[in-house]
Image: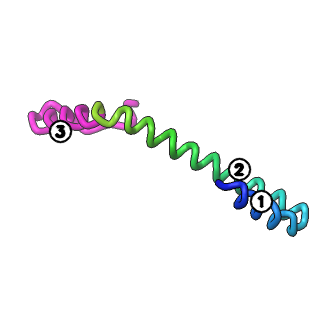
Amino acid sequence: MSPEAITTVVKMMETLPDNAQSQVVEYVQNYIADLQDELRWDENFKKTKSSLIQKARLAKQQVAEGKAKPLNLAEL
């Protein structure tokens, strides 16, 4: 973000009452945390994508060969 954009946001926030400023800060912190989580998820998925594809193909093959059985959640 450019320094000008940051300055504009700060000036806009300064026009708000303190309570509203706190709400904006909390919202932005949560929003940024969510974005960081998404970026980490995307990076982890990129790292494991080929492995996941191989495992999916193996599972599909095992189902076709009758070697797979339905998942019983009670057994987990």
Residue 60 placement (x, y as % from top left)? 17, 39
76 relative position to 53: left or right: right
- The residue type indicated by label 3 comes to Lys
Question: Which tag, 3 or 1, sits closer to the chain's start?
Answer: 1
29 relative position to 17: left or right: left
21 lies above or below 52: below
Mark 3 or 2, which is nearer the eye? 2
- The residue type indicated by label 2 comes to Gln
Q: Residue furthest left?
A: 65
Residue 27 placement (x, y as % from top left)? 72, 57
Please state which of residues 23 and 57 is positioned toward the viewer in this rendering: 23
15 lies above or below 57: below
Q: Quadrant of the C terminus?
A: top left
Neighbour tally class for label 2: few under 14, some 14-19, many 20 plus, Cα within 10 Å: few
Q: Which residue is mark 1?
A: 7
Residue 57 part of the magenta-drawn span: yes
Mark 3 or 1, which is nearer the eye? 1
Residue 45 part of the magenta-drawn span: no
Residue 3 placement (x, y as % from top left)? 72, 55
Q: Which residue is mark 3?
A: 60
- Residue at point 19%, 32% (across, down): 58
Q: Residue 29: which numbered mark, if any?
A: 2
Task: Find out whether the residues at labels 3 and 1 contact each other: C-beta distance under 8 Å.
Answer: no
Element class at badge 3:
helix
Whole-angstrom CA distance, mark 3 to mark 1, is 55 Å
Identify the magenta region: 52-76
73 lies above or below 9: above
Question: Which tag, 3 or 2, sits closer to the chain's start?
Answer: 2
